[in-house]
Image (cartoon, coloured by chain):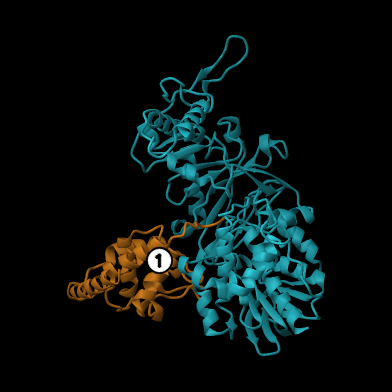
Chain colours: A cyan, B orange
Amino acid sequence: MAKITNNETRDPTSNGITKRSFLQSVGMIGGTAAVMTAMKGWDIGFASEVDRPPQLSTDGNGKKIIILGAGLAGMVLAFEMGKKGYNCKIIEALDYAGGRCVSARKGHVIQEIGADRQECNFQDGNYINYGPWRIPAEHKSTIYYCQTLGVPLEVMVNKSGKAYYYYENREGPFKGQTVRQEHADIDFKGYSTELLAKVADQGALDQIMSQEDKEQLLEHLKGSGLIDSKELDYRANRARGHSVYPGAGSNFGELSDPYAMADIFSISEASRNETADHPAVMFQAVGGMDQIAQGLKRAVGDGVITYNSEVTDIIQNDNSVEITYKNTQSGNVTTESCDYVISTAPLGVMAKINTNISDDFKNVLSATRGSPACKIGVEMNRRFWEQDDMIYGGSTSTDIPGQRLISYPSGNLFGHAHGDTGVILGYYPIGGASVPVSNMSIAERVKFALAAGEKIHPGNYRKHFTGEAMSVAWHKMQYALAGWENWSRRGRTRSFPVIQKGDKRIFISGNIASPALGGWMAGAIEGAWSTMEVIDKRVAQQA
Amino acid sequence: MKNIYLILISVMGLSALLSAAHAQDYSEEGTQIYTDYCEACHQPGGEGFEDVYPALKGNEFVLGDQEELIYLLLEGRAGMPTFIADLEVEQLTTIINYIRNSWGNAGGEVPHEQVTEAYEFIAEEDDGFGPGN
């Protein structure tokens, strides 16, 4: 199979057909599943492949589009389609734009179903991204809007070797103890290197590799600096670092001693957290991820978004769609007619709307699932993780049920931006594991976060807590009912292809239209891009 | 392969009969799992929350097709999450039987084997996509 790298935009076997247009034509013939198969065949995967919005072929032909939800997807649709001439209107249930792309800072309110109202009282400059919080380099679509809308990005340190692993539910010498990630990660790599080098050296791989390859392999393994070149034993090394740091004069420092191999096996699994879309270096919007939503809101312009409006009915016929919504403040009911409706509402929310979509389409929608997710931002009055632990960003990974990780803020490093203070992400359980946490009261969640954090940073975590925290259980937010949605395994292959076609005049967009990017901002954006293309083609055919 | 399924189906049928004769008591462990994983949304007593989270008490879906209910717990559905990564097969069997037979629900027993079969079927289909975020 010819291999094409991700950077190539043209298929060398064709006559100037771009990869994108080829995939589009595959899609027209064979549907989304065929596109995915073609993409897999090219080894380009499902990563965020598209780096700018599609070129729409019509000027909208005077069509009116009503979009449900002023989240990233809804605003991208209104912005891009509006630019071309479509008459777009967004109906938003909440009183702000951004949906789940939101940050809590002073004055921000979080109100969950059945929970106490929380109003944020963090110090000026402090915030918690309780929605999306990290952008990988390969999410070109997200970066595209930050760049074109003037939303500055900064580095988000996703992995810091100085942060810890903390496991209290595994037997072994590290039970209930913090271990530096760089120590555990390098030890695992070092012992693996040693074992591979030894078996190769002893001829155990001769059946599966040539002599020449074996020699090259050994050269690479020795070159790693992790094993000594004669005995091939893993030993103290500079990747693992020092127990006594080197300095001036005759202080050459002391290299730290590796842990025993058998012991390392009890802590190395978390290194799997690092994937191509969760690399060590990621990005975040300066001042809070909600700045991306704010950038889109400015781009969409005034008068496009109608706030505080809950859609109750979407009824379509052959020529139009009627949408009815209720003002959540005044109770006033409005009915409006349009040519197409695009819902970016989370499906749990969409399910409560009275619609006349076909039973087939309804069935397809049920092949999705909401993912619960919980977060808490815990404000600290001293950056002890930096000053005492040398941790600058990154996450400590734990097996405390309901916690999963502690993430240290990448903004305001050293307190340079606004003083010696910062907000730690105190827990971030996702999926079923987050449900027990959401069952706690707001006050109990703070207690839980503090107790868990104190185990990682004894003597500091409780002491430096300012008393201000903001927590969320996304599945208990009325207009979200999930952190994100994705497709069941069966649904991805069997049901998803139906979604993109829409049901007559009603379309489903947003992250649900990007099954491989569920929960990512790129999923919302590229879902919107794919929907607008489908509608534009429909409009072009009618013209 | 077909034969294996036939055997499985007959084993399941047999065990369903046996289970009906010696219905297990899932209430103690079921109560705990319900509190931890269900109550946050579906509320104490399976009452549900207004028109946001459906009541499980008297719920047609819960009391209906067993296979559909098993897949709901394993895969999620619409707004409902999957619990396949969080609960063991035994726990899934327990909670399915608990919600079908609590608060006046009388859905009868779903055999363990039926849950296990679906669980393994789904695990086999895992195409390596984890959750995003």
Residue B76 spot, x, y in % from top left = 45, 68
The quarter of the picture where the N terminus of chain A appears is bottom right
Nearest the viewer among A143 and B7 is B7
Residue A159: image location, x then y, percent: 57, 41
**Near-viewer residue (A238 or A464):** A238
Instruction: Pinpoint residue A257: horizontal percent, then vertical percent.
Output: 44, 23
- Closer to the camera in the image, A417 or A341: A341
Name the residue furthest bottom. Answer: A318
> Label 1 marks which chain's residue?
B
Q: Does any portion of residue A469 appear in the rendered image? A: yes
Identify the residue at image location x=50%, y=58%.
B129
Quarter containing the C terminus of chain A: bottom right
- On the question of residue A92 being in view, the answer is no
Q: Left of A103 or right of it: where is A59?
A: right
Depth check, front residue: A59 or A86: A59
Q: How many marks?
A: 1
Q: Position of residue A264 (x, y in %)?
A: 40, 34
Residue A18 sits above or below residue A128 on the image: below
Residue furthest toward the top? Answer: A250
A501 lies above or below A289: below
- Compared to residue A367, the image places residue A338 above or below, namely below
Q: What residue do we see at 58% from left, 31% from top?
A: A390
Q: Which residue is mark 1?
A: B74
Q: Residues within 10 Å of mark 1 (few under 14, many from 20)?
A: many
Kind of residue sitting beneath label 1: Leu
Question: For numbered disc 1, what is the local secondary structure?
Answer: helix
